[in-house]
Image: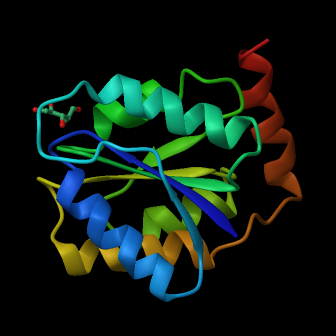
Amino acid sequence: MKIGFGSDHAGYELKEILKEYLSEKGYDCVDYGTNSKERVDYPDYGKLVGEKVAQGEVDKGVLVCGTGVGISIAANKVKGIRACVCSEPYSAMMSVRHNKANIISVGARVVGEDLAKMIIDAFFSAEFEGGRHEKRVEKICSIED
Ligand code: RB5
């Protein structure tokens, strides 16, 4: 699986850690920046990763900003994106099982490194359940039209 990463300056360090973590697990990781702690605007990176996922250039995305909120809001403006901010593994798992989330977002100022890894693990080991959830996800998609 190919995973696109994006962060702002606040999420830069955690993004690097998570990228290395998933690379070691054998995922193909593509980094769309930012590449330093120099101040940048999180919408630029949320939009970029959202577009890469929506275009199919990568299969899923990982976003990190201070709270995980701003960058996920930006990504969710891209058609076809269901980005979820998660601060614990249960929601991360359910965001895929029920909501077919295609981007996980975490807050570097909210969760520690180990918890972030658990959240990421929960997200990437989950599978969409389909069934009754399919129609609900279709309803979400129809809002975009
Ligand atoms: C940057 O200071 C901060 O606003 C940003 O990382 C994020 O938390 C926004 O949602």
Give the camera-side residue of 26 and 75: 26
- In screen coordinates, is 131 left or right of 46? right
- The x and y percentages for residue 53 are 66, 43
Please provide percent x and percent y for residue 45: 40, 33
Q: Is residue 78 above or below residue 55?
A: above
Image position of 41 with respect to 46: above or below:
above
Q: Is residue 21 left or right of residue 121?
A: left
Q: Image quarter for residue 56?
A: top right
- Quadrant containing the N terminus in the rendered view: bottom right
Of all residues, the one furthest to the bottom in this rendering is 25
The answer to which quarter of the image holds residue 2 is bottom right
| Residue at 71% across, 32% down | 80
The image position of residue 72, as x and y in percent, is 41, 36
| Left or right of residue 87, residue 63 in this image | right
Does residue 4 sit above or below 125 in this rendering?
Answer: above
Residue lying furthest top: 145
Q: Picture coordinates of residue 12 (x, y %)?
A: 22, 52
Q: How many marks?
A: 0
Q: Nearer the viewer, residue 76 or 58?
A: 58
Ligand 1 image position (quadrant): top left
Q: Residue at x 51, y 31 (%)?
A: 48
